[in-house]
Image: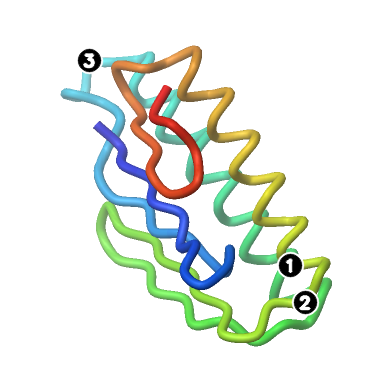
Amino acid sequence: MTEIRFLTEPALHGFEIKGHSSSDSEDDTGRLVCAAVSSAAYMAANTITEVIGDQAEITVDDAVMKLSCPSPSASTVATLEGLRLHLSQLAGQYNKNIRIYGGVKPC
């Protein structure tokens, strides 16, 4: 199960993703979902730091990715809202693989 927590205190400023969506190496759906979540998270992180130019603390480790932007611009907040919408829709389709917390009801 991949757990996604959006950092929303005091306002939306980041996310933390933990876990794997696949149960084993034979779980093709889980691997596909994991790849989709990872791709979306990296695109958001790269957009925030490389395109928008906001400073962010980013941690990437095995089955963990965290991004926290201490002073998010309106563009960064919009990017994070887009990520939250995208991942919420994925969670709606693959509710056995993804759980989302922080500003949205788990799907």
Above or below residue 87? Residue 44 is: below
Q: CA distance from mark 1 to mark 3?
A: 37 Å
Q: Amino acid at mark 1?
A: Thr
The relative height of residue 6 versus residue 49 in the rendered view (above or below) is: above
Q: Split into 4 quadrants, where in the image is the C terminus?
A: top left
Q: Is residue 15 left or right of residue 30?
A: right
At x 49%, y 62%, the residue is 8
According to the image, label 2 marks what residue? 73
Residue that badge 3 annotates: 26
What quarter of the picture does the N terminus occupy? top left
- Callout in the foreground (1, 3): 1
Give the residue furthest to the left: 24
Identified at 68% across, 66% down, the residue is 46
SS label for mark 1? helix
Q: Name the N-terminal-most of marks 1 and 3.
A: 3
Q: Nearer the viewer, residue 1 or 106?
A: 106
Answer with left or right where residue 20 lies relative to residue 77.
Answer: left
Crowding at mark 1 (Cα within 10 Å: few <14, some 14-19, many 20+): many
**Amino acid type assigned to the residue bearing label 3 in the image:** Glu
User: Where residue 14 appears, x then y in whole percent?
Assistant: 52, 65
SS assignment at label 3: loop
Tell me whether circle 2 and circle 1 mark residues in contact (CB < 8 Å). yes
